[in-house]
Amino acid sequence: MRLSQEIHRFIGTPGETISETAEAALTVVHPDDLDAVTIAFDNITAGRNSSITLICRVRHQEGHFIRVLFRGQVVERDSEGHPGEILGIAVKCDQESRLLLQHYWPQDVESFLDDAEIAVWRFDSRSNTTVRSHRSSTMLGYRPGDIAAGWPGWVALIHADDRMRVLDGVEQATRDGVKTYQQEYRMLCRDGSYLWILDRVRVHAHTLDGGIDVSSGLFIDISTQVAARQALEALSVTDGLTGISNRRQFDDTLTAMWGGYERSGRPLSLLLIDVDFFKLFNDQYGHQAGDECLRILSQAMSLTLRKGLDLLARYGGEEFAVLLPDCPAAEAWQIAERIRSTICALRIRHDARRIGMPIVTVSIGIAASDSLLIARADQLVGAADGALYRAKRLGRDRTVIAFEEPEDSASASLDLGGFDAWPLPRPEVRAVQPLPR
């Protein structure tokens, strides 16, 4: 039996005066309470109960008795069903507290923890053992005993993207000598899904060299809270009209990608895309049609990009931005032309256009980090914006690369073979497929 320093303090004994055997600990229990305490622990030993809640009087070092509430739970049994370890708490209580605890505290600790989606665990470096309550298995869909014993068995189920962060967190807590800390991470469930848990840790004792000697903690299912938090975070970086990234997400991603470019030297390109004569489109067909047009264009552009790599964002109004990591200017040109031709191929009617065919088109400006004239992220944006302005000045429906002379013949308006334009909505738009790269 191992008692915390807090228990030693309220019974008035130095730590070294308490024997670590259960039999010796019973000698400090009041004689009138000894039978009840013995019966309660006998029920645990016989397997009739897996948890215990009792109030008894314990002899203080000075000779008087104090009332203590003890609550414990079996966290491991051996092959014959005997309890291998019981994790518990002891609370000093006065007469009023005792009455409240007797009447209002849950009597079944294990059921209470299960209902709260909480599992308990304990680590002891002296025996190099980690014991966990059965809930640590069942909350992940496993049967008790399915997860390998000890810390390595638990670590093996931590999501690969979280594992090193968790291990680093444990090492950091050990170095800092903290008493409590917590971490959030994902655990692999039996059905292949992942469950978010909060691991709250209390360190009870340190080794002479500063390592963690004894610790215990709680595993708490926080999947619902994480899902709600992620939904709110997604809303904060998503454009409400088109469903693609918004300006805030663009700014954050640009900062991150520019940092990656500075570290690796791998090129980063930016496309700024503007819908030609969009104000006239709104004036001709109304703002609802204009909104639907932007949604259709967003979907079409998304299908032309590298999933999981490129970022498409609504930059403002009818202007869009595309970030292309690991992409030099020449390749960015090909992607921009694919976007432009895809939008032309939609043939969304635009009778209010002043020049060209009566369909919706876009102008695109490109800037790439491999230009000698660009040294900062804001200069990348400025260069792309300048290229976009040149594309519109040259007649729109074309792509221009910053600091290069545009090749009008390579970026002229496409000949789509007549004016077979579609008014909104056009059902086929939902089936737009990306052109091969």
Image (tube, helix red, strand yellow):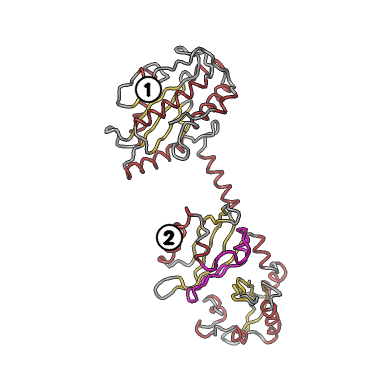
166 above or below 240?
Answer: below
Q: Residue 273 carries which label?
A: none
Q: What residue type is labelled 2?
A: Asp
Name the one closer to the observer, 152 or 363. Answer: 152
Q: Is residue 383 left or right of residue 30?
A: left
What residue is shown with label 1?
389
217 above or below 22?
Answer: above
Q: How many marks?
A: 2
The residue furthest left is 372
**Crowd class of label 1 (few under 14; some 14 to 19; many from 20; radius 10 Å):** some
SS of the residue under disc 2: helix
Cβ–Cβ under 8 Å for marks 1 and 2: no
Image point (44%, 24%), residue name: 340
**What quarter of the picture does the N terminus occupy?**
bottom right
SS of the residue under disc 1: helix
Q: At which x and y percent is residue 435?
A: 47, 28
Q: Is residue 163 left or right of residue 140?
A: left
Q: Which amino acid does label 1 sit on?
A: Tyr
Q: At which x and y percent is residue 238?
A: 52, 37
Name the one closer to the observer, 373 or 341. Answer: 341
Image point (67%, 72%), residue name: 50
What residue is shown with label 2?
168
**Crowd class of label 2 (few under 14; some 14 to 19; many from 20; radius 10 Å):** few
Boundaries of the magenta span: 121-150
Q: Is residue 148 left or right of residue 397?
A: right
Name the one closer to the observer, 360 or 88. Answer: 360
409 above or below 30?
Answer: above
* Residue 107 colored in magenta in the image: no
> In the rendered image, which quarter is residue 252 located in?
top left
> Which of pointers 1 and 2 lies earlier in the amino acid sequence?
2
**What quarter of the picture does the C terminus occupy?**
top left
